[in-house]
Image: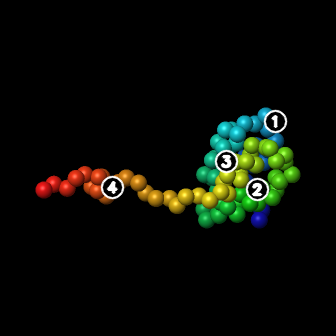
């Protein structure tokens, strides 16, 4: 897989080059990266390739931690709220 198609803006690459970058800054960069993934691109596959490419970085780098968290099991997205939830929350009238 081509790294230019995974990290089109070079955000992750540059994050690894910034001295003293914080965990919070890495999370913000990761979010921007994730929002700009090409349509149909599997995020887990892309993250795995990023970790492979930048795996030589120190283990303690905050971006490595953020990428690993991105691979963690994600809870199933469930819609909350909406008309149905409001109707179910109201007691029925006699």
Instruction: Judge by depth and name the residue closer to the eye, 56 or 41.
Output: 56
Task: Judge left or right: residue 58 versus residue 11.
Answer: right
Distance between mark 2 and mark 3 Cα atoms: 11 Å
Find numbered disc 1 in the image and state the secondary structure of the residue it sits on: loop
Residue at 82 percent across and 41 percent down: it is: 17
Distance between mark 2 and mark 4 Cα atoms: 40 Å
Residue 9: percent from left, percent from top: 71, 49
Distance between mark 1 and mark 2 Cα atoms: 19 Å
- Closer to viewer: mark 2 or mark 4: 4
Q: Are marks 2 and 4 in contact (CB under 8 Å)?
A: no
Residue 7: percent from left, percent from top: 73, 54
Residue position for label 2 = 50
Task: Judge left or right: residue 24 versus residue 92.
Answer: right
Report which quarter residue 49 is drawn in: bottom right
Q: Is residue 8 among the parts visible in the rendering?
A: no
Q: Sequence order check: which comes first, mark 1 or mark 3?
A: 1
Residue at 27 percent across and 55 percent down: it is: 87
Residue position for label 1 = 19
Find numbered disc 2 in the image and state the secondary structure of the residue it sits on: helix
Distance between mark 1 and mark 3 Cα atoms: 17 Å
Residue position for label 3 = 30
Q: Sequence order check: which comes first, mark 1 or mark 2?
A: 1
Q: Do the residues labelled 1 and 3 touch (CB within 8 Å)?
A: no
Residue 46 is tagged as: none
**For the image shown, how many numbered marks are present on the structure?**
4
Residue 56: percent from left, percent from top: 86, 51
Q: Sequence order check: which comes first, mark 2 or mark 4?
A: 2
Position of the C terminus, as image quadrant, is bottom left
Q: Sequence order check: which comes first, mark 2 or mark 3?
A: 3
Residue farthest to the right? 56
Residue position for label 4 = 85
Residue farthest to the left? 94
């Amino acid at each position: 897989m081509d790294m230019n198609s995974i990290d089109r803006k070079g955000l992750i690459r540059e994050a690894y080059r910034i001295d003293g970058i914080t965990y919070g800054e890495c999370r913000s960069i990761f979010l921007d990266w994730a929002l700009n993934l090409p349509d149909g691109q599997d995020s887990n596959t892309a993250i795995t390739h990023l970790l492979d490419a930048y795996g030589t970085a120190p283990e303690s780098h905050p971006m490595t931690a953020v990428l690993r968290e991105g691979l963690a099991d994600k809870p199933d997205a469930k819609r909350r709220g909406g008309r149905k939830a409001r109707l179910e929350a109201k007691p029925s009238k006699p």
